[in-house]
Amino acid sequence: MTEVHHLDHLIENAFPSFGGGYVRRVWGLLDRAIGEGVPMTLAVAGPVTASGQHIAWLNPLLDTGWFCLVSTTDAVCYHDGHRGLDDAALHPIHEVPLNGDDGALREDRIIRITDVGFDEDVLLGQDRFLSALLREPEFQRKMTGTELRYLLGSRFARQEKKNDAPEGLLALCHRKAIPVFVGAPADGSVFLNSMKLWAMAGAGMLEHAFELDLHAEVFESCAYHVWGQRESSAKALGTLVLGGGVPKNFNLQPEPALSQILGLEDVEGFLYDIQITTAPVTDGSLSSCPPAEAVTWGKVDKDAYLQTTESMQADYSTVMPFLTKALLDKRDRLRRLRDELGEATLLERHPEARGYLRDDRGFRLYDDRERLVDALKAEVASRSEMLTGSIDYDLA
């Protein structure tokens, strides 16, 4: 212990077993996947933006360029906008007692998410902002959810700059062209504000043409999976799953969608699957489903999973800050070594530096979305005979 000078070395040498052993194995797989240059997807559930965790560790992790897409919830996107509102300074998000007087909080109009509290006016202000924003001309069409969140990210960034607020999750994903997926878009307040405008339009109060194209959004996620398998330098994908629920399943479903539904051949599941969840495997939920079970669905590579997957039962908010710090510290250490040794010597001694020090502009998949989607459409069209033969059934 006294001879360890770096956080990653501490994890590798001072976490031999039990819960610590899980931390060490999760670290080891993240280190391998990133060092090999494997594009990573991120599935994150839970109030990561309301709690400020995106500012603390999630945004720094995504800013590395190691992650190619995000799967999350509508609530994460909604709460992401709070700190950029014009009156955010008047209603700061703050800590509240976990087991306090919730009746008193309600009397004071304080909303609680576990130990995070904020004035109800924060929600009302966010609703007014979104209602006004969704009436803007760029939203008056049918679009995928990734298009919606890309546009939201641009507008959130403008609000954050206007009010000197830290960069939010959607603003960062917009800057780095990281597609953001929400598998259950109707389950959250971004869509609820669109529902309000839809109802007002139905009553003749205004015009509202915004509509989500869910078919195209799911198809787009499949196109990115094909890109990872066939076009990325690693010819593989890895995933980091934080929490579970819909973000996890939406993130994992492209392989069965491609192979079982669309009938594509030579499509593999994720090479790396690293999961941190509080759900016990005995509850039978999707959140607790370990990577080994996902192998049976084709979502995870059956030939490699024994060496490339891990599921840790923990609250990710207690683990990810220091795992992120260890990853960023190792990247910075490799940068310094590159300056000292030169790139050739560095790669000879530390081949993982190639993955750690890849271009931090990232994969920018959103910029390439139309080409990738069109390529997959063409491949689907070439399988006409198989697909038309898959839609008949002797219905009762």
Image (spheres, rainbow, N blue to C red):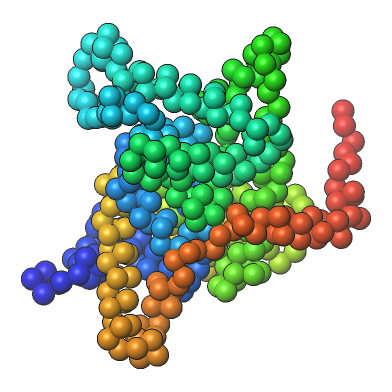
In this picture, is 22 found above or below 99? Answer: below
Residue 80 seen from this side:
no
Pinpoint residue 253: horizontal percent, then vertical percent.
61, 49
Residue 221 seen from this side:
yes
Q: Which residue reaches farthest front?
A: 162
- Horizontal relation, residue 84 to residue 178: left or right: left
Pinpoint residue 204: horizontal percent, then vertical percent.
71, 11
Q: Which residue reaches farthest left?
A: 2
Pinpoint residue 9: horizontal percent, then vertical percent.
22, 71
- Horizontal relation, residue 258 to residue 174: left or right: right
Q: Quadrant of the N terminus?
A: bottom left
Q: Residue at x 42, y 22 (%)?
A: 125
Quadrant of the rendered image containing residue 230:
bottom right
In this picture, is 280 found above or below 300? Answer: above
Observer-nearest of 153 and 73: 153
In this picture, is 227 found above or below 174? Answer: below
Quadrant of the rendered image containing residue 383:
bottom right
Q: Residue at x 45, y 41 (%)?
A: 158
In this picture, is 152 found above or below 345? Answer: above
- Horizontal relation, residue 19 to residue 228: left or right: left
Observer-nearest of 230 and 59: 59
Q: Residue at x 59, y 69 (%)?
A: 232
Q: Residue at x 76, y 57 (%)?
A: 374
Q: Quadrant of the C terminus?
A: top right
- Horizontal relation, residue 21 to residue 58: left or right: left
Pinpoint residue 152: horizontal percent, then vertical percent.
53, 39
Q: How many marks?
A: 0
